[in-house]
Image (tube, rainbow, N blue to C red):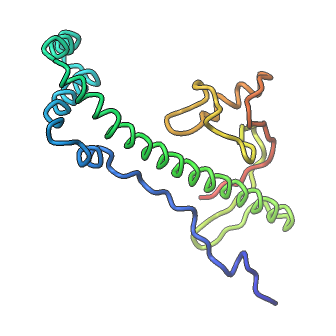
Amino acid sequence: MGAHPARDTPRAAAPIQEPMNATESIDATIPIEIKAHVHRLEQLWALLEDPPEGVDVAANVAAYVAESDQDVALAIAIYLKDSLEPALTVGRKARARILDAVQRNEKEREWLRRTLGQLLDRLKLERIKGPTITVTRTASASKRAVMKAGADVELLPERFLAPREPATGAIRDALLAGEAVEGWELVDEPGVMLR
């Protein structure tokens, strides 16, 4: 028997890289004369994100604005343009790379599960028990939403997005109700369970 490339050449899943620490990269780009203003803005932002009980955040922001001058306005503008916007661009690119890696890994997982199912079907086996794993052919209990090749997650409406990934349950429900969801379709195929 000859070599089998798919079996004999191990291939690692696409790596998922964490984005760099944006706070550290932003801090390194802030000119010294702007850091004091930025520090105060970060304090105000922290209040806005998680307002402590009994603290009037709006009054704190209004007081900061009332005591500020053109130098503060310029400091905020410089911080936005030269530090925060570039950091956001880097973060968005990192997020896109991570999302691409996750999507590639998910597609590969689905393909491998389908291939494993086809192999079980060809062998006419419902179950294979190995020393460390049991593979069981499962019947298709319900339809599930799967992303089509080349579909863009960024085009999905907000209601179909769970934190950091598509809300496949909501997408499935919409598709079952007859609603078109760009880049998605319902498939009805038996699954594979690994234990």
Give residue 116's quadrant in the image: bottom right
In the rendered image, residue 36, in percent from the top left (x then y), is placed at: 13, 33
Instruction: Work out whether residue 58 can be spotted.
Output: yes
Compared to residue 83, the image places residue 72 above or below, namely above
In the rendered image, residue 73, in percent from the top left (x then y), is placed at: 24, 22
In the rendered image, residue 114, in percent from the top left (x then y), is placed at: 76, 56
Q: State the count of labels.
A: 0
Which image quarter holds the C terminus?
Answer: bottom right
Left or right side of 66 for 12:
right
Task: Depth check: give the residue in front, 24 or 167.
Answer: 24
Residue under the image location 14 percent in, 37 percent down: 33
Left or right side of 22 for 125:
right
In the rendered image, residue 68, in percent from the top left (x then y), is placed at: 16, 17
Which image quarter holds the N terminus?
Answer: bottom right
Left or right side of 67 for 94:
right
Residue under the image location 33 percent in, 39 percent down: 82
Compared to residue 42, the image places residue 151 above or below, namely below
Task: Depth check: give the residue in front, 193 or 4.
Answer: 4
Residue under the image location 39 percent in, 42 percent down: 86
Give residue 121's quadrant in the image: bottom right
Q: Which residue lies furthest to the bottom in this view?
A: 1
Left or right side of 156 for 17:
left
Compared to residue 166, the image places residue 101 above or below, namely below
Instruction: Work out whether residue 54 can be spotted.
Output: no
